[in-house]
Image (spheres, grey):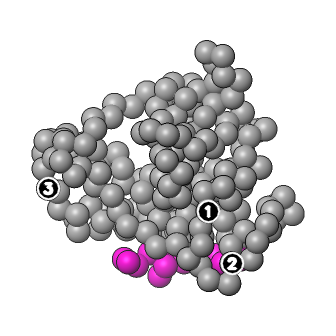
Amino acid sequence: MNSIIPRLRVYPFKDEHRYQDLVLLFDQLFASNFNTRLIKGDHEPVYLPAGSGQPYAQVVFAHGFYSSALHEIAHWCLAGEKRRELEDYGYWYCPDGRNQQQQEEFEQVEVKPQAIEWAFCLAAGKAFQVSTDNLDGVESDRQQFQSKVQQQLKDYLLFGFPPRAQQFIDALQAFYQSQSALQVDDAVTV
């Protein structure tokens, strides 16, 4: 598998992370087999299935933000075949400004993708922070949410990631020349 991973640049310091590298890695891994491309968007992130004049599905991340790209890739890696036929995988999204109940529902569905995003960050040598994504709404217990995400990451490390997530982790590790395998001890808070 490492033979298909480009080594475009060597990173002597792990603080240079470019979204363009993620686009290249994602497209090399998934464009032909899943007819899906990673796209830098100008607005909010969204998943758009193929169709309506678009020949391929699009994982659109926000404003060229590296972390947004990793997060949206994590959602895509979790989505099953039927979900990938629906805009935003058919899920409800309530924007910033959520009340307590809405925030709890949001955090419940964000545990798995944020755990995968955390693994992506570890593989790329990038710091990770959980996101409660509710600046104008109720203040949530960030520490409690982080603990849930951390536990999910540990579970993935012990029992395995979804296959596409593992492929992307492997690609990130090869590209950034990071450690050979993620360990449960890697799931420490930052």
What residue would you read off at disc 2? 11
Nearest the viewer among 132 and 21 is: 21
Crowding at dot 3, Cα within 10 Å, few <14 / some 14-19 / many 20+, comes out as some
Relative side of 59 to 56, left or right: left
Label 1's element?
loop
Label 2 to label 3, Cα distance in Å? 37 Å
> Whole-percent x and y of residue 84?
56, 31
**Viewer-nearest of discs 1 and 3:** 1
What residue would you read off at disc 1? 18
What residue would you read off at disc 3? 139
Q: Is residue 31 magenta?
A: no
Does 85 appear above or below 11?
A: above
Nearest the viewer among 143 and 161 is: 143
Residue farthest toward the top in the current orientation of the protein: 52
Magenta segment boundaries in residue numbering = 177-190
Residue 159 visible (yes or no): no
Give the residue type at disc 3.
Glu
The residue sitting at 16% across, 47% down in the picture is 137
